[in-house]
């Protein structure tokens, strides 16, 4: 039985802890805050309850596997999973809108043809076929296996089979998500729909590789799911599974240093000066934080994977308490697209001193009685990708974004401002405080192509005995990918460096 110290109680870290405990190891989780879940938190006030992190789940099979492997008990025995249908309602400023059925290619094609004109559905359907090919090519190396030692080959070749496009007497193929929209979808509204999937993960569509096409494909192929009571209930279920497997949690325990002995990780030192010895250390923290805890480089010189110095966009969220009942047939998720999406994308990467343009806004309206005081009220969550390095310490910045989100929300929620009882602002600083992520930025899933710049660091490090877990490590961000990182780390510790992933 090995002693394992886990830094952080995010979902990926807890997934690793539960699996390692089942394998017979003694696992202790050190969390600097007073609760578990990382970014998967809850805010409660006046009988209203809100998810403050992710609001929906894709690839629920990751957590189904976790619960079966750690207790031979279905996930559905612990939480109620609800398939969201329609998957999303998309609203455009020209007055058009479309509701996309969940996990139905034929239904999506028909809906797009009816809403956007004949041919729109066919182009999107053809795109999904190509996106599936990219998914099939990258699913194992970028989700189910530890990062290859020769990871550079994943960045050299673009797995998305782009359609040849003639331009200025040259034949080119889309290399970015924006080029897919321009050259293959050939409709501003379809392009906006595609880009919204990238923005949800803080990706810039102009630089995100074409392989980011797997993001809408995952939703299409595996469905969009909601956990009754909110996604926080999923984190609670994983935490309780850890306790059942005798994982020990120490809250309010900030790790100040990773202890080394004989050239390997040998435990953690806490802020109070105490030392907890361990045979392995699993770190579920931001790369900048991990560097501060160690005394040596953790990756090879010249490594170009996901620049740890870069600050990807963050998320600005409004929690709205509304008077009045949710109208019948209201969509669970509505995405409101701005009139000038190019301005939003430019501002996310180079905010400068200009006022922010209207962003793409996601509105979540779960039909869930557990989130509201009674049926005469409604709890709504609105969010948008924002520059992480904007002057969030200035009250005017948050006020400006609040107005932008509320203006967009009128297209998703009838009489929004008139129904508003109160709202709570969740700026990037809140995420930074809760997760330790630099500037509150949000990690994206690992992606192939792009010369490796969209890959996350490997779960192993150059310091023997030290492992990385969670959204800032392979296979990247998002609930499903973070959960898979836990499975990969557990496999590497239990089976050793020969571990090659799930079969």
Image (cartoon, rainbow, N blue to C red):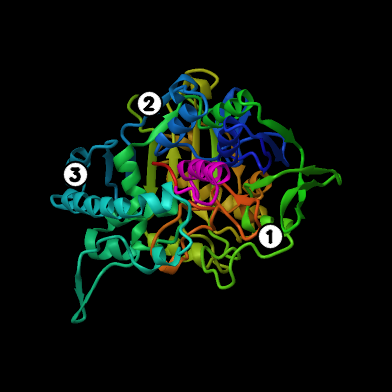
Residue beneath disc 3: 109
Residue annotated with mark 2: 327
Of the image marks 1 and 3, the number of the one nearer the N terminus: 3
Residue 117 shown left or right of residue 299 in the figure: left
The reply to whether dot 3 and dot 2 touch (C-beta < 8 Å) is no
* Inter-mark Cα distance, 1 to 3: 47 Å
Q: Is residue 393 visible?
A: no
Q: Say whether residue 226 is left or right of residue 164.
A: right
Residue at figure coordinates x 67%, y 46% from the top left: 280
Lateral position of residue 417 relative to residue 112, left or right? right
Q: Is residue 103 magenta?
A: no
Task: Tell me the CA gap for discs 2 and 1.
Answer: 50 Å
Q: Residue at x 55, y 20 (%)?
A: 373
Q: Is residue 123 left or right of residue 146?
A: left
Magenta-highlighted residues: 476-500
Q: Which residue is mark 1?
A: 291
Q: Are marks 2 and 1 in contact (CB under 8 Å)?
A: no
Q: As displayed, is residue 331 above or below residue 74?
A: below
- Density class for disc 1 (Cα within 10 Å; few <14, some 14-19, many ≥20) is some
Please report whichever mark, 2 or 1, sits nearer to the chain's N-terminal start: 1
In reply to whether residue 482 is colored magenta, the answer given is yes
Secondary structure that dominates the magenta span? helix
- Given residues 437 and 192, the one toward you in this image is 437
């Amino acid at each position: 039985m090995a002693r394992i110290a886990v830094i952080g109680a995010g979902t990926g870290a807890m997934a690793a802890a539960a699996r390692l405990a089942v394998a017979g190891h003694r696992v202790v989780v050190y969390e600097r805050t007073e609760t578990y879940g990382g970014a998967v938190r809850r805010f409660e006030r006046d009988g209203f309850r809100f998810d403050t992190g992710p609001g929906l789940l894709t690839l629920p099979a990751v957590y189904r596997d976790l619960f079966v492997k750690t207790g031979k008990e279905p996930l559905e025995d612990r939480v109620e999973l609800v398939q969201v249908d329609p998957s999303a309602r998309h609203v455009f400023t020209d007055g058009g809108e479309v509701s996309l059925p969940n996990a139905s290619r034929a239904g999506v094609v028909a809906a797009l043809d009816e809403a956007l004109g004949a041919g729109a559905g066919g182009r999107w359907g053809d795109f999904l076929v190509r996106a599936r090919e990219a998914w099939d090519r990258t699913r194992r190396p970028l989700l189910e296996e530890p990062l290859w030692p020769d990871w550079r080959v994943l960045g050299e070749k673009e797995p998305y089979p782009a359609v040849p496009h003639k331009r200025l007497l040259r034949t080119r193929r889309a290399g970015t998500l924006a080029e897919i929209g321009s050259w293959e979808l050939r409709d501003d509204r379809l392009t906006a729909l595609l880009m919204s999937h990238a923005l949800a993960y803080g990706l810039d569509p102009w630089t995100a590789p074409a392989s980011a096409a797997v993001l809408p494909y995952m939703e299409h192929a595996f469905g969009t799911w909601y956990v009754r009571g909110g996604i926080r209930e999923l984190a609670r279920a994983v935490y309780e599974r850890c306790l059942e497997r005798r994982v020990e949690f120490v809250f309010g325990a900030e790790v100040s240093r990773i202890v080394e002995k004989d050239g390997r990780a040998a435990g953690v030192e806490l802020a109070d000066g105490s030392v907890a010895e361990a045979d392995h250390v699993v770190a579920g923290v931001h790369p900048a934080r991990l560097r501060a805890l160690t005394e040596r480089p953790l990756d090879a010189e010249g490594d170009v994977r996901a620049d740890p110095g870069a600050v990807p966009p963050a998320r600005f969220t409004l929690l709205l308490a509304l008077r009045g009942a949710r109208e019948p047939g209201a969509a669970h998720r509505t995405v409101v697209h701005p009139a000038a999406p190019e301005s939003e994308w430019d501002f996310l990467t180079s905010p400068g001193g200009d006022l922010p343009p209207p962003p793409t806004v996601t509105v979540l309206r779960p039909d869930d009685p557990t989130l509201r005081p009674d049926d005469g009220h409604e709890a709504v969550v609105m969010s948008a990708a924002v520059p992480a390095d904007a002057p969030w310490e200035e009250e005017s910045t948050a006020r400006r974004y609040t107005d932008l989100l509320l203006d967009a929300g009128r297209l998703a929620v009838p009489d929004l401002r008139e129904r508003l009882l109160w709202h709570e602002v969740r700026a990037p600083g809140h995420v930074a405080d809760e997760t330790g992520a630099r500037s509150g930025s949000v990690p994206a899933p690992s992606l192939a192509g792009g010369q490796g710049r969209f890959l996350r660091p490997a779960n192993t490090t150059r310091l023997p005995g030290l492992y990385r877990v969670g959204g800032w490590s392979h296979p990247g961000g998002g609930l499903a990918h973070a959960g898979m990182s836990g499975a990969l780390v557990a496999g590497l510790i239990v089976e050793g460096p020969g571990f090659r992933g799930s079969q």
